[in-house]
Amino acid sequence: MSSLPFGELPPHRPRKFLPARIAWDDWSAVGPLFDRLEADLARATTPAELEAWLLAWGELSAGMSEEGSRRYIAMTCHTDDAEAEKAYLQFVEHVEPQVKPRQFKLEQLYLVHPARPALSTQRYEMLDRHTRVHVELYRDENVPLETEEARVGQQYQKLTGSLTVQFRGEEKTLVQMGRYQEEIDRGLRQEAWESVARRRLQEKDTFDAQFDELLKLRHRIARQAGFANYRDYAFKARGRFDYGPAQCEAFHDAIAAEIVPVLRELQSARKRELQLPALRPWDLAVDPANRPPLRPFEQVDRLVSGTQKVFERMDEALAGQFRLMHDRHLLDLANRKGKAPGGYQSSLPEARLPFIFMNAVGQQRDVETILHEAGHAFHTLATREEDLFAYREAPIEFCEVASMSMELLGSEFLDAFYAPDELRRARRDHLEGIVETFPWIATVDAFQHWLYTHPEHTHAERAAAWNALMDRFGGDVDWSGWEEARAHSWHRQLHVFLYPFYYVEYGIAQIGALQIWQNSKRDRARALADYKKGLSLGGSRPLPELFSAAGCRFAFDRETMKPLADLLRSELAALQ
């Protein structure tokens, strides 16, 4: 695929089951591979033969998954590339719908195979647990709905990636406009913020219509799978075996009780330092001491070299892994017009390599993002020698521990970008960001609970529900004159559109990451070793065991939250 920066990549293990070349968008080439797997499974009689079959199945799944990743990467790197969009939609609309029923059939056959009970329970417990859920939830009639869901999601990405504003004689992407929120000139900040808000509001009806369509599709998917609402379906589909909606609601309460007071303290101090009667939305990112914005780098090459120094000081092995990514062109970091918003790490499951996508524009947040996505990349590389495809990916709640821990551990070495005074400021900004993120996570997660348990809601009811949550978790910010922008501010949260219920994981993981960082203050080498041990387990163990291996506790109630809130308060005070 010519629009990919890394080009062709060889499989990490030589192919045994797949042919050397395969046209993934030609079902006459792909379909017979599933026929062959079914026939091979019928011939398998011993546990050893069944285990060999699982590896062949994983080889096909990895090849299919990598093809999907490559097309997604190409499409998000160039949303204005008609060929990349066509290739992505061809795969989503014409290949994946044919793959899903065949994968379901293999899962069914595996679960009833006479040799399966003789397999090691310790080794295959997690695979069996997830496979049972897939079989239980799968419905043929949901496949076209899921295809349509992906199509609408792609249209959301295309729209958000295309948005620009004319600002002071120049066309700017909305991501590029974010830099102005750090400017000392309050009038400039307000002008920039308002121009972006107006541009988003011009598309509010389109965004609302896209979400309406997604809501209806997801509700139908849930009902056809036998669930009263999409929330309950999504919790099961996401493999949330170790917690449920009630624990999430308790988490919201813990954030309201322990973190929101810290947020209000920070906002009060900010208002006092800025000498303002009230904080407005354009007063939240500027330095409260009116120092110029932190500019850790101007060019992306400097971001890469500085990050490399961070890892060299932290751990030789991790530094080598980041260098490999750079050398293999597995980084696309600069913002540009036509590039999808946000940042992500995508794994290439057959090459068993990570790819990092970002929209860097020279902010401190970009440094945090590269550390975050590098944590995901290290996770991918930590499981590279795991040959069971299903175990090369961990539950999202622990994947985000990998990334958020790296933000905190890496923050100790940000003098690769900053002088001492700027270093303290950058670290404090990062911790303030954590305090601000917990309530936002609670807002987004609680909103989704409401959305999907009230599927017949009106747009006015939706706005009222969002505003009530902003009142509960948003702290003290004056949105006067911009009430409509506040009521639609969830439009910018792509997870609501693309990855329903994938957001609370960030909060759960942040609790794990804070514990690992706390451990590092006592024994840095031990904390890093535990971190890497947890990553190496991939998805082979349940969440509580993954957290335990990494040296932290899997819990997100008020009892767990309080000491971490105290840690944040004390560290922020020390960095003042």
Image (cartoon, rainbow, N blue to C red):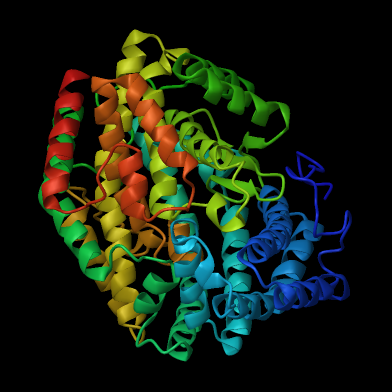
Q: Left of 198 or right of it: where is 151?
A: right
420 to 145, vertically: above or below: above
Residue 576 visible in the snapshot: no
Residue 245, position as x, y percentages in the image = 26, 69
Residue 154, position as x, y percentages in the image = 62, 65
Residue drawn 50% across and 21% down?
Answer: 311
Camera-side residue of 213 and 120: 120
Residue 381, position as x, y percentages in the image = 58, 38
Residue drawn 65% across and 63% down?
Answer: 54
Residue drawn 55% across and 38% down?
Answer: 377
Residue 67, position as x, y percentages in the image = 74, 57
Residue drawn 48% across and 90% down?
Answer: 224
- Rendered image quadrant of residue 93: bottom right
As drawn, the residue found furthest toward the top would be 420
Residue 470 visible in the snapshot: yes
Placement of the C terminus among the 4 image quadrants: top left
Camera-side residue of 43 and 128: 43
Q: How many marks?
A: 0
454 to 208, vertically: above or below: below
548 to 150, vertically: above or below: above
362 to 149, vertically: above or below: above
Q: Left of 477 or right of it: where is 235?
A: right
